[in-house]
Amino acid sequence: MASDRRGNPEHRGRVTVSECPVHRGEQCAPRHRVTTWPVDGGRVKDRCTCTCGRRFPVTADGAAEHLVDPIDPGGAVEVPPGRGATWTMAADLPPDAGSPIASPGVVPVETPVLHVATEPVGAVTREIKALVKHMVRVMHRAPGVGLAANQVGVGLRLFVQVHKGAAPEAMVDPEIRASDGTWTYTEGCLSLVLDDAHAPVDRPRRVQVRARTVHGEVVEVTADGILARILQHEIDHLDGIEYVQRLVGEHHDRVYGLMADAGLDVDCVPPTPY
Ligand SMILES: [Zn+2]
Ligand SMILES: [Zn+2]
């Protein structure tokens, strides 16, 4: 996407636009939307990402729709209680040892922390920021497109994702507020690296997620397509759900057969279709 900027010199330096500056609406459509409330209650930022990848400030007629009206935190952002305030890396970050069925630094299916709901983070401390850095490194090394904290052995509610131009790289205490549509897309997981374990999963096509950034801002992200898919896969992890639990029919039978052949206890991933 960086090459777009160089290829469109007439738009260089433009800071205030109300629609996509690349194609001006011919082939472009607003796709993702991020509303950000600053910590101190200052001006709310509202931006869209176009189908072409460019971001632009939202106006009423150029905006991707919120699925439900955003909750305005109003004034200073409140930080809920959570374990983040006292959590330390030394406490439960596992060694970087690999597992034959997981990416390096990632815990495999059957690890208890993957199969229970994670705890709220609350305050984002230096230690939490260090955890985020570690997770980003592990994600890129895999390489993967998203990674939940419990996949690195830490039972806290936060994840990282690669589309940081469209949504925050790290989302803390995320919750899905609304979803719509259905889309089938093939998923895999860094905690289950078995040949042929990728399989199509039906999920909502769009989601609206509320979370905090590592800087303490509240964000509401309305995401479509692959970004929406990543957010849902990672939030499922934070709820203790592995993508295989969403599989149905022949895909369920095939992947559960592969897991059983690999010696995994499939009772830890009970089917949980929508
Ligand atoms: Zn565009
Ligand atoms: Zn996963």
Image (cartoon, rainbow, N blue to C red):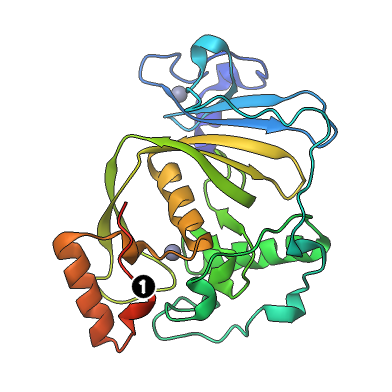
Image x and y of residue 63, in percent: 51, 19
The residue at the far bottom in this view is 263
Residue 43, above or below 243: above
- Asked whether residue 138 is in view, the answer is yes
| Horizontal arrangement in the rendering, residue 133 relative to residue 123 (left or right) | left
Residue at 58%, 13% in the rendered image? 59
Residue, far left = 250
Residue type (three-letter) at the residue carrying disc 1: Val
Q: Quadrant of residue 93?
A: bottom right
Res. 171 in view: no
Residue 103 appears at what percent x and percent y? 46, 75
User: Could you say which is closer to the camera, residue 63 or residue 137?
Assistant: 63
Which residue does the image show at 24% across and 74% down from the upper left?
A: 256
Residue drawn 44% across and 50% down?
232
* The one of 11 and 235 positioned closer to us in this rendering: 235
Classify 114 as above or below 65. below
Question: With respect to residue 239, does 80 lie above or below?
Answer: above
> Horizontal placement of 98 versus 263: left or right?
right
Mark 1 surroundings within 10 Å by alpha-carbon count, few (fewer than 14), some (14 through 19), many (20 or more)? many
Q: How many marks?
A: 1
Image coordinates for residue 217, horizontal then vertical, percent: 74, 40
Q: Is residue 193 above or below residue 232?
A: below
Relative side of 261 to 169, left or right: left
Mark 1 residue element: loop
Task: Write down the residue under mark 1.
Answer: 269
Residue 260 lies in what quarter of the image? Answer: bottom left
